[in-house]
Image: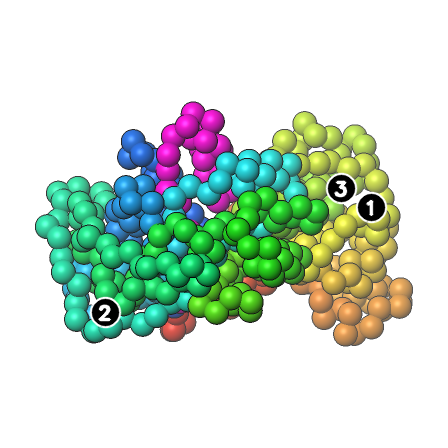
Amino acid sequence: MREIIERLTAWQRSGTRYALATVIATGGSAPRTPGAAMAVAEDGEAVGSVSGGCVEGAVYDLCLRALETGDSFRETFGYSDDTAFAVGLTCGGTVEVWVTPAPPPAVISALSEALTAGRPIALAHLLPTPTPPTAPAAPALAPAVADAEHRAAPALAPAVVAAHPADAALAASASGRRAASALVPVVADVVGSDVLGREGVVGGVLAVDGAACYGSTGEVEVDGVVVGEARGMLEAGVSGVRSVRCREGVEVFVASFAEPPRLLVFGAIDYAGSVASLGRFLGYRVTVCDARPVFATPGRFPDAHEVVVDWPHRYLAATSTDARTAIVVLTHDVKFDIPLLKVALRLPVGYVGAMGSRRTHAERLDRLRDAGLSDGELTGLRSPIGLDLGARTPEETAVSILAEIVAARRGGRALPLTATDGPIHHDH
């Protein structure tokens, strides 16, 4: 959503109608995570991605259908050896997508302002509880379009819209569950689909931050439950589907947009510039800190979000960190390193790494023990820093360091994929 919010805002200003598709759940080797989004305007322009290419054509068609009918769709795409030309993921995973006409202007405006300002906000979509497919029969296939890049079938089969009881407790129709859009030549199976109209609770979308709620489901009780759930998930920085306990048959998908994780780089040396550049590319908010003003200048580190002149240990003790924060110590100077690491290794952060040779590391451990750190606390130090890539240049060293940070954050084994088996993408 971060990548497409600027375009959504522009469409909203110009009065352009659009539909929004959001990944709400994944399984196996799905290439995108929950919260990934794609939007299609009424003129056919598309922005964003929900699958990295595997099912984009089918989701594009669903968006056009949502624009035409005003309905919302909950659909799961999965893999099957028995349907070699059906819509799905060649990687073998599953992806569940919620497609709906554009959220209310107040919701998109609040989301845009928060993301631009770097403030945490959550987007909550009200969904029907999914029902299993009525039959295992393979979906009908539409003729393929000769588009070498996207290879998408041109249309969806007619959708069936569920009836809407007066109390807005909506039930998905058991018929019309299989859309006849297709991608060629991917191997997959459309696992299930729900098609619903825009009335009532289901289909509602809210933006929620720590102080306000934008949009409404139309029911105060449901709004209260959803806002509480969204704020709890936003505080934890997690996204996912939850049941709405006050409304049977309704779920909520919450996409949390917390502040970007922080990368704190201590030591304004040549390696710090490359670490800052790659860290920013990976979505971190990067700070470079050094006590020497002649080296710690914005001009030397243009990709850092901020450059701080201060004693590293003093700055770290005073700044905000959380479990996603990565600390990279590049100074390998005892008068900086020891006070800094004494603070860093006692913080509940995600990663602490320090540059230096194995001899430097051994001497550093002795000094840290003398400074009062326990062996348990010292196990949190990754030193020598980075993965063994044979890196030589500052740029290669930055790749080595950030690769270790990614592995630590995502639970990766930091091994060549050829030396592993099982899913490439892991659920978290």
Distance in Å between CA atoms under marks 1 and 2: 54 Å
> Callout 2, which amino acid?
Ser
- Residue 212 in the image: state x and y as whole percent: 66, 46
Asked if the residues shown at circle 1 and circle 2 are in contact, with their CB atoms under 8 angstroms apart, the answer is no
- Check disc 3: other Cα within 10 Å, few if <14, some if 14-19, many if 20+: many
In the image, 321 versus 361, the foreground residue is 321
Which residue matches tag 2?
Answer: 80
Quick one: SS at disc 1?
A: helix
Q: Residue at x 38, y 44 (%)?
A: 101
**Is residue 164 found inside the magenta-colored segment of the image?**
no
Which residue matches tag 3?
Answer: 289
The residue segment tinted magenta is 1-27
> Callout 1, which amino acid?
Tyr
In this rendering, position of residue 367 left or right of residue 394: right
- Check disc 1: other Cα within 10 Å, few if <14, some if 14-19, many if 20+: some
Which residue matches tag 1?
Answer: 315
- Residue 71 in the image: state x and y as whole percent: 33, 49
> Callout 3, which amino acid?
Cys
In the image, 307 versus 105, the foreground residue is 105
Residue farthest front in this picture? 166
**Is tag 1's residue or tag 2's residue first in the polypeptide sequence?**
2
Residue 275 in view here:
no
Which mark lies nearer to you, 1 or 2?
Answer: 2
